[in-house]
Image (cartoon, helix red, strand yellow):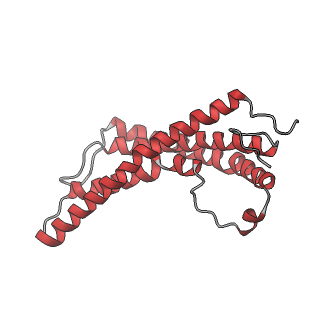
Amino acid sequence: MKKNRPCNQKVQSIINLIDGLNTAIGKAVSWCSLLLVIFVTIDVALRYGFNISFVALGEAQWHLYAIIFLLGAGYTLKDNGHVRVDVIYQRLGKRARAIINLLGIIFFLIPGCFLVIKTSIPFVKASWMVSEGSPDPGGLPARYILKAMIPIAFLLLSIQGVSMFLKNLCILFSIRIEGKRST
């Protein structure tokens, strides 16, 4: 293949679409962090200042945390923010890292996401069928909506894996991505 030729326009469009989707969702979900801080502050103030506690407020906190964690995963992958402990990987060149990334996406990320999506759908379906809510008195209704976030989150993570796969293919074949030469 020729060096320095631009990434196929269709491939770049797919990358941009996927990255844009996860960026928009990630930025929207980031506002849940502010809401979570507010809820925790209120909960602590009520509990320790007035000896008052609300089940719904406690559940709202872990619901928000779950939404941040689940829906933010694709955005985190896009920005290469997942934790890595790899002394060897850091010392490799871009092409060697691209090969490792491609293998990781093919053998771990996509199959793992598929497995979670496949196994969570019956779980989510059952929750929707009974309009599952909190089992605790005073808890939040509509827990089934939160459970539906599981396959959605892993779908977003897997399509971000497709974007990452395409980017690494471009790197592997020394194709330029968005005007930057990858070597």
Tell me the quadrant of the picture where the N terminus can be found: top right
Query: Is 104 on the left-hand or right-hand side of 135?
Result: right
Q: Residue furthest left?
A: 50
Determine which quarter of the picture holds residue 39: bottom left
Which residue is nearer to you in this view: 8 or 33?
A: 8
Q: Residue at x 70, y 28 (%)?
A: 9
Q: Residue at x 74, y 62 (%)?
A: 89
Query: Is 155 on the left-hand or right-hand side of 91?
Result: left
Q: Residue furthest right?
A: 1
Query: Is 60 on the left-hand or right-hand side of 148?
Result: left
**Above or below: residue 60 compared with residue 131:** below
- Asked if residue 160 can be seen in this view, the reply is yes
Residue 58, horizontal then vertical, whole percent: 26, 59
Which residue is nearer to you in this view: 122 or 40?
A: 40
Residue 22, horizontal then vertical, whole percent: 52, 41
Q: Residue at x 49, y 44 (%)?
A: 153
